[in-house]
Amino acid sequence: MATQVTNYQCPACTGPVHFSPETGKVVCDYCGSTYDLKEIEAIYAEKNANAAAAMAEEEKKKQENAST
């Protein structure tokens, strides 16, 4: 049994996606785009890494401005 549930949005249109057991892929409910589970996980990992880097850069700028 799954220990974690992750709700993804379609990278193409931001619509909700669901896992299709027939194809073994994640399918968008709106635009019909399909993704391998590993592919969508990689897209989200990159998106999260970029967001973390942007937040770190913003925090660095705040600290630099506070010390000047």
Image (tube, helix red, strand yellow):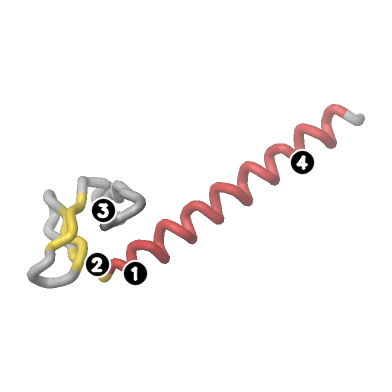
- Residue 42 x %, y %: 42, 66
Which numbered disc, 3 or 2, marks the residue that appears first in the sequence? 3
Which numbered disc, 3 or 4, marks the residue that appears first in the sequence?
3
Q: CA distance from mark 3 to mark 2?
A: 9 Å
Q: Could you give the CA–CA distance between mark 2 and mark 1, rounded to whole angstroms? A: 6 Å
CB within 8 Å, label 4 to label 2: no
Give the amino acid at mark 3: Cys
Q: Residues within 10 Å of mark 3 (few under 14, many from 20)?
A: many
In which quadrant will I find the N terminus?
A: bottom left
Q: Secondary structure at mark 3?
A: loop
Residue receiving disc 4: 60
For disc 1, the marked residue is 39
As displayed, is residue 63 above or below residue 44?
A: above
Where's residue 34, x and y in %? Answer: 19, 65
Where does label 3 land, which residue? Answer: 10
Residue at label 2?
35
The CA span between labels 1 and 4 is 32 Å
Q: Are marks 2 and 1 in contact (CB under 8 Å)?
A: yes
The residue shown at (30%, 50%) is 8
